[in-house]
Amino acid sequence: STEELKEYFSQFGSVQRCQLPFDKDTGFHKRYCWIKFSTQQDVQNVFQKDSHILEGAKLVLKQQPHRRHNQRKNQSE
């Protein structure tokens, strides 16, 4: 669940947001989630650990490039 993920990742730093999308048809989660940390150092802490296992499942982590809202191009240009 979202709370279990948030609790697990909070050992590496301050978790700002945890999103675990669910499939409306099956009711099961879609086997991926997004974790947003407060600082870049928190993110680095996560990737310093070799592997992450939650409830017997090995997690595969990918870092999404950091984007800021003011860096997005204006679509009307």
Image (cartoon, grey):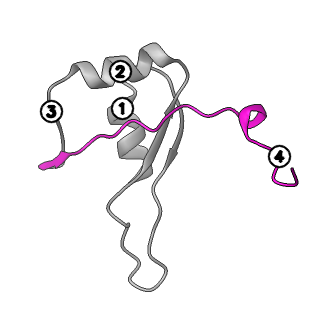
Q: How far apart are marks 4 and 3 (CA)?
A: 39 Å
Q: Looking at the image, tell me whether mark 2 or mark 3 is earlier in sequence order.
A: 2
Q: Is residue 67 magenta?
A: yes
Residue 23: x %, y % from top left? 44, 75
Residue 12: image tag: 2
Residue 38: x %, y % from top left? 55, 22
In the picture of the structure, the residue carrying the numbered disc 3 is 51
Residue at the spot x=43%, y=18% of the render? 42
Q: What element carries label 3?
A: loop
18 lies above or below 26: above
Residue 74: image tag: 4
Q: Which contiguous range is marked in magenta?
A: 56-77
- Given the image, on which type of amino acid does mark 4 rest? Asn
Which label lies toward us, 1 or 3?
3
Q: What element carries label 4?
A: loop
Is 52 left or right of 7, judged from the image as shown? left
Q: Distance between the residues labelled 4 and 1?
A: 34 Å
Q: How far apart are marks 1 and 3 (CA)?
A: 13 Å
Q: Looking at the image, tell me whether mark 2 or mark 4 is earlier in sequence order.
A: 2
> Where is residue 51, by image quadrant?
top left
- Given the image, on which type of amino acid does mark 1 rest? Phe
Toward the viewer: 12 or 70? 70
